[in-house]
């Protein structure tokens, strides 16, 4: 059996950054994402977010691909949200997403960061946060 420890911090936003993920519906959507991940054998360690985006921390297994995980979670959840009319109007996720590796010693800090999104976004916009994440990961 291979010994693999690959942690990925994902961030994806609602289409056009619409504020669909209200405090009322976000827990239901997050619960659904957790169940869907479990069914697809994706180890979704931690998830949280704000009105227009979600962060997740995933521990990948052998044979899993970053893009495939994002597609499975985003695609299935948007279909489920629309089918069950969880949000008013048509719901969709932005095509792009952020994914960066996380060093195992940094996993607890990323969990805290994700858990603190409500408070974080009282001071920082999603656009500023996303730019910071891209810079920190070396994309800009």
Image (cartoon, rainbow, N blue to C red):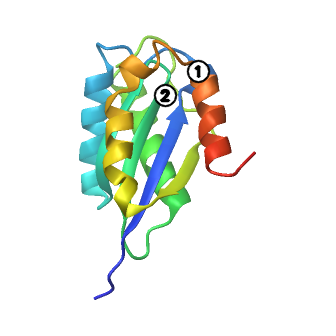
- Circle 2 crowding by C-alpha within 10 Å: few under 14, some 14–19, many from 20: many
Please tell me whether residue 28 is drawn above or below residue 23 in the rendered image.
Answer: below
**What residue is disc 1 on?**
17
- Circle 1 crowding by C-alpha within 10 Å: few under 14, some 14–19, many from 20: some
**What residue is disc 2 on?**
53
Quadrant housing the N terminus: bottom left
Most extreme residue toward the right, as rendered?
A: 140
Q: Residue at x 45, y 12 (%)?
A: 122
Please say whether residue 96 is visible from this viewpoint: no
Residue in front for this viewpoint, 58 or 67? 58
Which numbered dot is residue 61? none
Q: Secondary structure at mark 1?
A: helix
Please say whether residue 39 is visible from this viewpoint: yes
Q: Quadrant of residue 2?
A: bottom left
Residue in front for this viewpoint, 38 or 54? 54
Q: Secondary structure at mark 2?
A: strand
Q: Is residue 134 left or right of residue 79?
A: right
Marks 2 and 1 sit apart, C-alpha to C-alpha, by 7 Å
Q: Closer to the N terminus: mark 2 or mark 1?
A: 1
Residue 36 % position (x, y): 29, 47
Residue 30 % position (x, y): 30, 33
Most extreme residue toward the bottom, as rendered?
A: 1
Q: Residue at x 58, y 45 (%)?
A: 98
Q: Quadrant of residue 113?
A: top left
The reply to whether callout 2 and callout 1 are in contact (CB within 8 Å) is yes
Please tell me whether residue 120 is drawn above or below residue 134 in the rendered image.
Answer: above
Residue 50 % position (x, y): 42, 22
Q: Residue at x 39, y 25 (%)?
A: 117
Quadrant housing the C terminus: top right
Q: Residue at x 45, y 16 (%)?
A: 20
Q: Is residue 124 left or right of residue 22?
A: right
């Amino acid at each position: 059996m291979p010994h693999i420890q690959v942690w990925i911090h994902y961030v994806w936003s609602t289409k056009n950054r619409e504020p669909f993920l209200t405090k009322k519906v976000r827990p239901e959507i997050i619960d659904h994402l957790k169940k869907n991940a479990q069914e697809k054998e994706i180890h979704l360690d931690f998830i949280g977010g704000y009105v227009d985006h979600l962060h997740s921390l995933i521990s990948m297994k052998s044979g899993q691909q970053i893009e495939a995980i994002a597609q499975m979670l985003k695609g299935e959840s948007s279909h489920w949200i629309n089918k069950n009319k969880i949000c008013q109007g048509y719901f969709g996720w932005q095509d792009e997403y952020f994914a960066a590796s996380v060093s195992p010693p940094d996993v607890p800090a990323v969990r805290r960061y994700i858990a603190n999104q409500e408070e974080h976004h009282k001071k920082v916009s999603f656009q500023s946060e996303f730019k910071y994440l891209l810079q920190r990961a070396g994309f800009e």
